[in-house]
Image (spheres, rainbow, N blue to C red):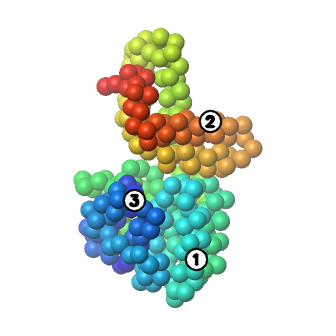
């Protein structure tokens, strides 16, 4: 089995490592990627291929695992190489995008002669202990992706056609990452209102399970926030004219601010989170 993965981010490289460990040949492209991506690809045992034609010519599957804003541009970039390839490659969009975005990517891939699968990834990157995310797959070619189950991936089919898996992913993320954005705003307000310790004590007593979940979730936000900006924007697009869409446009702003501070290494700017959600 030959699988191309773009890109070698935290999720993509971990999936690549799992596939390699189970016997698949895994390639990637480092075009436009930094040194961190190159290091992750090397650690995962992924072969770096510079040329797009070489990347897709021998692949059975191509998995696009990127920040949402890059999903359509990647499909457009690879379309000429896909068109020059013999039919048969399965283009798998694994990005946190709205159903309409999944349809756009699918149309580009199909026009270039590839089969298309819409995938929503729910859960963290595969771990050495065997734990891994669920890959929900939709579309006429989704059944083909079940072959990756032999290489350590938990693939689950979703009825409803292209867009259904993306809708499931965004519905789940709206509840989890949306809740985290709300918690961040509340933590900031509680710090400003000098009631953070009282709020923490009340949560520990009356909502212990929710608070424990937030204690696990919040410390990971700063390094992931740059990806979640686009995800919140896609959720807002998914919700359409519903008034709750404005909430997720706001959540995108929350994560954009955190990503900016993280890029500037302004850890002090998030002190109110550390205080409220300390273990």
Label 2 residue SS: helix
Q: Position of residue 141 (x, y in %)?
A: 54, 74
Q: CA distance from mark 1 to mark 3?
A: 23 Å
Residue 25 in the image: above or below residue 171: below
- Observer-nearest residue: 193 or 166? 193
Which of 71 and 37 lies nearest the eye of the viewer? 37
Within 10 angstroms of label 1, few (less than 14), some, or many (20 or more) residues?
A: many
**Label 3: element kind:** loop
Secondary structure beneath dot 1 equals: helix
- Residue 161 visible from this viewpoint: no
The label nearer to you, 1 versus 3, is 3
Q: Residue at x 54, y 74 (%)?
A: 78
Q: Residue at left 65%, top 71%?
A: 107
Residues at discs 3 and 2 in contact (Cβ within 8 Å)? no
Horizontal side of 116 relative to 25 (left or right) equals: right
**For mark 3, what is the residue?**
34
Relative to 86, residue 279 above or below = above
Residues at badges 1 and 3 in contact (C-beta under 8 Å)? Answer: no
* Alpha-carbon span between mark 2 and mark 1: 34 Å
Which image quarter holds the C terminus? Answer: top left
The quarter of the picture where residue 127 lies is bottom left
Q: Which residue is mark 2?
A: 250
Q: Report which residue position mark 1 lands on.
A: 79
Relative image position of residue 2 (x, y in whole percent) = 37, 78
Corner quadrant of residue 101: bottom right
- In the rendered structure, find residue 227 and report the number of the disc placed on it: none
Sequence order check, earlier mark of 2 and 1 = 1
Q: Nearer the viewer, mark 3 or mark 2?
A: 3
């Amino acid at each position: 089995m030959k699988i191309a993965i773009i890109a070698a981010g935290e999720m993509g490289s971990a999936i690549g490592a799992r596939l390699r460990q189970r016997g698949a040949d895994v390639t990637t492209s480092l075009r436009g990627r930094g040194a961190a991506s190159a290091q992750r690809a090397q650690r995962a045992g992924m072969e770096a291929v510079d040329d797009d034609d070489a990347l897709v010519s021998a692949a059975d599957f191509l998995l696009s695992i990127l920040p949402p804003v890059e999903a359509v541009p990647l499909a457009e970039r690879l379309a000429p190489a896909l068109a020059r390839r013999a039919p048969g490659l399965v283009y798998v969009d694994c990005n946190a995008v709205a159903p309409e975005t999944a349809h756009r990517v699918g149309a580009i891939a199909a026009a270039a002669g590839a089969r298309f699968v819409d995938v929503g990834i729910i859960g963290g990157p595969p771990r050495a202990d065997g734990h891994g995310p669920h890959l929900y797959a939709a579309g006429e070619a989704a059944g083909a992706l079940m072959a990756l189950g032999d290489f350590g991936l938990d693939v689950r089919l979703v009825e409803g056609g292209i867009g259904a898996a993306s809708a499931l992913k965004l519905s789940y993320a709206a509840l989890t990452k949306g809740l985290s954005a709300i918690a961040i705003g509340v933590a900031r307000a509680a710090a400003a209102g000098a009631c953070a310790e009282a709020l923490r004590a009340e949560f520990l007593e009356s909502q212990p399970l929710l608070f424990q979940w937030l204690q696990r979730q919040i410390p990971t936000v700063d390094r992931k926030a740059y990806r979640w900006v686009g995800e919140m924007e896609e959720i807002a697009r998914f919700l359409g004219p519903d008034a709750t869409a404005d909430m997720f446009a706001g959540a995108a702003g929350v994560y954009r601010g955190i990503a900016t501070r993280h890029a500037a290494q302004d850890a002090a700017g998030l002190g109110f989170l550390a205080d409220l959600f300390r273990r």
